[in-house]
Amino acid sequence: MSRVALVTGGSRGIGAAISMALKEAGYTVAANYAGNDEAAAKFTAETGIKTYKWSVADYDACAAGIAQVEADLGPVDVLVNNAGITRDAPFHKMTREQWDQVIGTNLNGIFNMTHPLWNGMRDRKFGRIINISSINGQKGQFAQANYSAAKAGDIGFTKALAQEGARAGITVNAICPGYIATEMVMAVPEKVRESIIATIPVGRLGDVTDIARCVVFLAADSAGFITGATITANGGQYMT
Ligand code: NDP
């Protein structure tokens, strides 16, 4: 029986690459998404990976969605908390709604997804939790007080939970991507993109596969000695 992996925001962008890489590595994969039915249907048609729609910001929806995935595919062994949003604004213009939306998805979302799975992983004495944080959670970013706070929170959550899961065979790790060539980043004007690339020592944006590769590495049964770690994958742009 292959291990089961659940990837939030797993039908687009970095998440889609993670879902595909895990499938290629032999996992049975479920990809969650929030609302883009068209992208999810296309993804399933192209990859054969099942998609499941619910918001990670809603605890009850997460519990119900996870129950459905487990009924379809079996107990989840690997959880990749990848779903994330931005609602950027300089702080003097940031609304409470922008704050709440980003904290709700990017920070509360990882509680909402991990909590319903935790006891099952403890009982089975195996689990892999991989949280996709961000370079901007490590260094902070102008106009992203909400996003930087949530992503820094993801790292704190990772380190705390790694201690709780260690004796139960559960590892908890974070990955901090730098600028990755997703639709969002490719949509910024070329001049701005070039100025970003000029700050990246390797001289290019990251590819989604650069992050997917890290996930496959951390998900492996053989990666059991790595827990509480933060892997930076940013082309050398920020060295911790
Ligand atoms: P995208 O915007 O391309 O995709 C986001 C995915 O998350 C989509 O599948 C979306 O679903 C899903 N999603 C959003 N909100 C929710 C929600 N409430 N519940 C469930 N799913 C949700 O993002 P990226 O691929 O660029 O980013 C993926 C992760 O990597 C994020 O956590 C991001 O913060 C992080 N990151 C990205 C960087 C980059 O350069 N791109 C850099 C550093 C970190 P749907 O398709 O339905 O909209």
Image: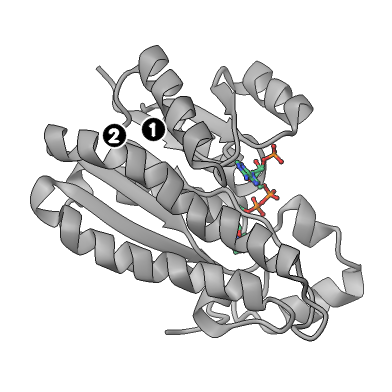
Name the residue that disc number 2 marks: 77
Identify the residue at image location x=65%, y=62%.
100
Residue 143 picture location, percent across and down: 74, 80
Looking at the rendered structure, the kind of residue marked 1 is Ala
Q: Is residue 41 left or right of residue 30?
A: right
Residue 133 picture location, percent across and down: 50, 63
Q: Quadrant of the N terminus?
A: top left
Residue 50: quarter of image:
top right
Q: Secondary structure at mark 1?
A: strand
* Residue nearest the observer in this picture, 126 or 108: 108
Near mark 1 (Cα within 10 A), the count class, few <14, some 14-19 or many ≥20, is many
Name the residue that disc number 1 marks: 5
Q: Quadrant of the C terminus?
A: bottom left
Residue 78 picture location, percent across and down: 33, 38
Looking at the rendered structure, the kind of residue marked 2 is Asp
Q: Is residue 234 above or below residue 175?
A: below
Establish whether ligand 1 lies closer than 8 Å to the Cβ of label 1. no
Do tag 2 and tag 1 residues touch (Cβ < 8 Å)? yes
Measure the alpha-carbon separation of dots 2 and 1: 6 Å
Identify the residue at image location x=67%, y=68%.
99
* Residue nearest the observer in this picture, 194 or 228: 228
Q: Is residue 33 left or right of residue 240?
A: right
Residue 126 picture location, percent across and down: 18, 39
Is residue 228 among the parts visible in the rendering? no
Residue 199: quarter of image:
bottom right
